[in-house]
């Protein structure tokens, strides 16, 4: 998070915000605003390889769902600055997966999130050599295959979230923004017959 640490705010997705985020570019725009702070549609367009008209349209869709808002303290009347309205987003999967009619929107949203995670990893790998060796040695791309029950997976995720939250603090000199991605899900074994 940019700037001084403030009390973290989270939006739990409702039908409107889920629909707004069920697009890869919107997930990316919201992520950039959360990670780097306020920006214009033009600035976001140059960072995403999209036109300012495209980013402006998608920012308005996010604003309509209450996920971003105009930053009235910036700009000169000609340019609109946008900022994230909350620090994080949460999907209550249990509430959404019970109704099959919600499945397409949930799938589109989760697909956009997976794409954003993969893009962040690829972006780091493309510029890894520009980082000092201490940062190159500190990073990891790891996975573990664990035999767990669904209840144990819930407990594992809750414990990992508590660990990550225990590191939340105001930025200090020498800090870098670190992306922590947690992906945990069941996987069916595919054995040869």
Image: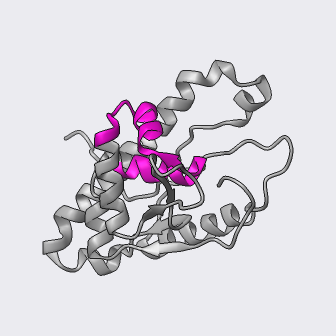
Q: As rendered, which of 17 and 82 lies closer to the eye? A: 82
Looking at the image, residue 96 sits to the left or right of residue 159; the answer is left
Is 11 placed left or right of 13 in the picture?
right
Q: Quadrant of the N terminus?
A: bottom right
Q: Residue at x 68, y 73 (%)?
A: 7
Residue at x 41%, y 44% (from the top left corner): 41
Q: In which quarter of the image is residue 25?
A: top left
Q: In this view, does 44 lie above or below 49?
A: below
Q: Tell me if residue 188 can be seen.
A: no
Tell me if 158 is positioned left or right of 104 in this view: right
Q: Quadrant of residue 139?
A: top right
Residue occupying the point 52% across, 57% down:
83
Depth check: give the residue in front, 116 or 69. 69
The residue sitting at the right extreme is: 173
Q: Residue 112, image x and y in percent?
A: 32, 50
**Residue interval drawn in magenta:** 26-53
Q: In which quarter of the image is the C terminus?
A: top left
């Amino acid at each position: 998070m940019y700037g001084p640490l403030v009390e973290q705010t989270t939006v739990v997705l409702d039908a409107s915000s889920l629909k707004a985020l069920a697009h890869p570019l919107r997930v990316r725009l919201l992520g950039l605003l959360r990670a780097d702070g306020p920006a214009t549609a033009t600035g976001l367009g140059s960072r995403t390889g999209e036109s300012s008209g495209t980013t402006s349209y998608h920012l308005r869709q996010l604003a309509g769902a209450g996920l971003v808002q105009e930053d009235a303290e910036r700009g000169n009347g000609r340019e609109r600055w946008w900022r994230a309205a909350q620090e994080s987003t949460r999907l209550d999967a249990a509430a959404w997966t019970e109704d099959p009619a919600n499945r397409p929107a949930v799938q589109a949203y989760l697909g956009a999130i997976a794409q954003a995670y993969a893009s962040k990893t690829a972006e780091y790998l493309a510029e890894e050599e520009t980082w000092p060796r201490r940062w190159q040695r500190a990073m990891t791309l790891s996975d573990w295959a664990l035999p767990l029950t669904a209840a144990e997976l819930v407990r594992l995720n809750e414990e990992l979230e508590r660990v990550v939250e225990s590191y939340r603090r105001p930025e200090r000199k020498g800090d870098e923004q670190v992306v922590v991605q947690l992906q945990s899900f069941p996987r069916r074994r595919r054995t040869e017959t």
